[in-house]
Image (cartoon, coloured by chain):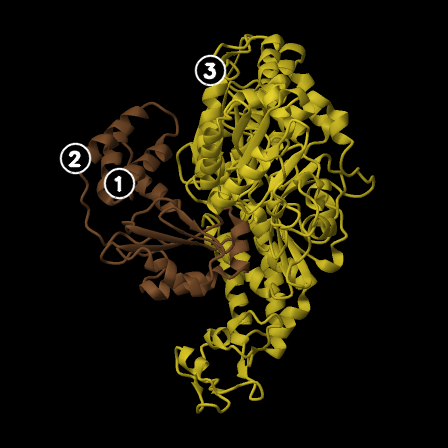
Chain colours: A brown, B yellow
Amino acid sequence: MKKKPTTVAFNGTPEQEEKLKAVIGKYRGVKGAMMPILQEAQDIYGYLPVEVLKIIAEGTETPMEVIYGIVSFYSQFKLNYIGDTAISVCLGTACYVKGSQEVIDTVSEQLGIEPGATSADGKYSLDATRCIGACGLAPVMVINGTVYGKVKKSEVKGILAKYKD
Amino acid sequence: MAVLTSLDDLNAVKAKYIDDIELPADSGKTRIVVGLATCGDAAGARPVFEQIKNEIAAAGKQDEIELIATGCVGICQYEPVVEVHAADGSRTTYVRMNADKAKDMFARHILGGEIAKEYTIGPNSENSDVTSLEETSFYKAQKRIVLRNCGIIDPEKIEEYIARDGYKAIYKVLTEMKPEDVIQVMLDSGLRGRGGAGFPTGRKWLFASKSQGPKKYVCCNADEGDPGAFMDRAVLEGDPHALIEAMTIAAYAIGSDEGYIYVRAEYPVAIKRLQIAIEQAKSYGLLGQNILGTGFNFELNLRFGAGAFVCGEETALMTSIEGKRGEPHPRPPFPAVKGLFGVPTILNNVETYANVAQIILNGAEWFSSMGTKAKPGTPIMGSAGTKVFALGGKITNTGLVEVPMGTTINQVVNEIGGGVPNGKKFKAAQAGGPSGGCIPASLADIEIDYDTLKTIGAMMGSGGLIVMDEDNCMVDIARFFLDFTCDESCGQCAPCRIGTQRMLEILDKIISGNGEMEDLDKLEELATYISSASLCGLGQTAPNPVLSTIRHFRDEYVAHIVDKKCPAHVCKKLLQYTIDPEKCKGCTACARACPVGAISGSVKKPHVIDQSKCIKCGACMATCKFGAISKN
């Protein structure tokens, strides 16, 4: 999946940086630790902007391009700020067969953002995900961890309305 | 917890907990099991669990009733599922529960002693009088080895696993068997890799045991990435100790002292349960240093995937554990010779491991007696044991099924799966996800067997079985899978990176009505290059969905290319919406629904769609109350 750099300004706190440095310290000397470090860094900040990657590069003495190479390889790592309302629609086989493309198209239309993007105000972000394994409930949409199953395109508007502030 | 060092210690734990599971007649105990795997949770099982917990407390029955949050029961369609196991041996399956139903059920069944029949599986499925899952046709044809504990035990309680003879196999291995004996049993059992490729597990272990290295690793591929497949998740969430025990056995067999489980990060419940299981096993002395007091050591680490499908390929997975971009590399050298961190490594899939302890306990002969036999003189080597399938798509009973090898696709779809719903016709089943092929309904009497499936251009795959009906367009399905592999291609080698892209462009051309007959030849030619020249399994198998749909549904491709029609009415650009003037009442609802103003007509007069303006969104058809709008 293509990755777009963030359009929302970085505002990491000193506490977050301290936590991240503790994580880097914890993995010092552990073989193959870059993935867990990046995953935990993303847990701390919610995404991995260049400012965070720099701290990791310095802390682990790894060239920045190696780290960027890893981050851009895995779809789970986000270079982009994730909106307060994070919406993802499953485009796995079962969901697709049951019409999830229509669902994501409708969400995209309603919010005016493409899959993979965050609205400029940082409120919403939309993603297409691979199978989340809840195929019995297809088509499936996940909003901030809440799973909506058997979603019809006509229901999208109503579901989104619940997340208006 | 005390460290266990003998068979007596294991038996003592078993003796203490077995009554909680088997409920002897004189115990007067009841066990209420709530399916709380990811799918159960998503369907709303948590409030049901809480409700029952409160009811038990309110009735003061904590001592008589054991409430368990278990893994996947296997009937996704009917989640949330609650099962009541009584001391008389009966088992009642309540389906599609909610907190209110749970309250009512508790009052009537648990306190009143009468089954709340209308909530049970029978009245909610086809078998009208049945109240237990075990009596349904969905369950009867199944044979549960891999899923033997799923939906039965509390996966967060190691004692329940031990009560079901858990960790007895590792005890037997460490005290009675030499590493070569273990490998011999695996070879004799005929177990083949359940990740889809079907490589004999015993041979893999044999190679690794013979390789020399300063260290060896045992790895587990729990990066279940095929869309539509979720059987590994069921084992991880429902029976995590089975995996830990099997990996320890593998470590002893090849001479390893450290292992990794690579789980996809999209499975948070599985990760949590694995973490709990590893801690519990360590505290009982069943993992870590000096296992069962025998002096054997095995450390197990968890690593999480980060959403790259290619990491399901073995060399890519190991590169990812090493903390790098998960790009595959050429084989040989095979991982058994030079794998993780450059030393001999074995990698097996979750489902493969889930068979291991049972094979050790019951013997190779028991396992190889199930399934299909080798046919000398043909490429068919025989497939022993069972296979778990994740049934999905257009099927009545969505869920997990475990059947002996040799069962036919028809039996799985129609007998166990309950067939295609809504009176539609079963058209094809897709096995093996984006690497696999389709099995058309006309060939669905084929036996499930690694090599037999290959003869019709399909494959076993990891276990996703997506059922399709007459409303699914096979060209569209092929395009969908190709789009997936194209997106997930790591980009390292040209045949896969560029080849899949070119194939996708040709398919796009076909579904938009611009295809030519030569395109089919081009697709087949490209497919040959891609499968022979790609570096890893992802690219080598990427053309399969296209090839198999061309093979079995050529007429659909021809219809798209020559007639410019999509027979299943799926491909948007080939559709035409029309209003039947006989049925149209002129209510104007469709004209108001149309986002582009393509529908015109005056009130109470038949309306007309302007085809040049129509964007084929289908809004009009969804709005019409009189069924006057059709697409073709």
Q: Residues within 10 Å of mark 3 (few under 14, many from 20)?
A: some
Which disc, if any, is residue A45? Answer: 1
Residue type, numbered disc 2: Pro
Q: Say which residue label 3 marks.
A: B283
Tell me: residue B411, above or below residue B477: above
Q: Residue at x 46, y 58 (%)?
A: A151
Q: Position of residue B530 (x, y in %)?
A: 57, 54
For residue B385, which quarter of the picture?
top right
Q: Determine the chain carrying the residue at label 2.
A: A
What quarter of the picture does the C terminus of chain B occupy? bottom right
Whole-number angstrom distance, CA of label 2 to CA of label 1: 12 Å
Q: Are marks 3 and 2 in contact (CB under 8 Å)?
A: no
Q: Say which residue label 2 marks.
A: A14
Counting labels gives: 3
Whole-number angstrom distance, CA of label 3 to CA of label 2: 38 Å
Front label number (1 vs 3): 3
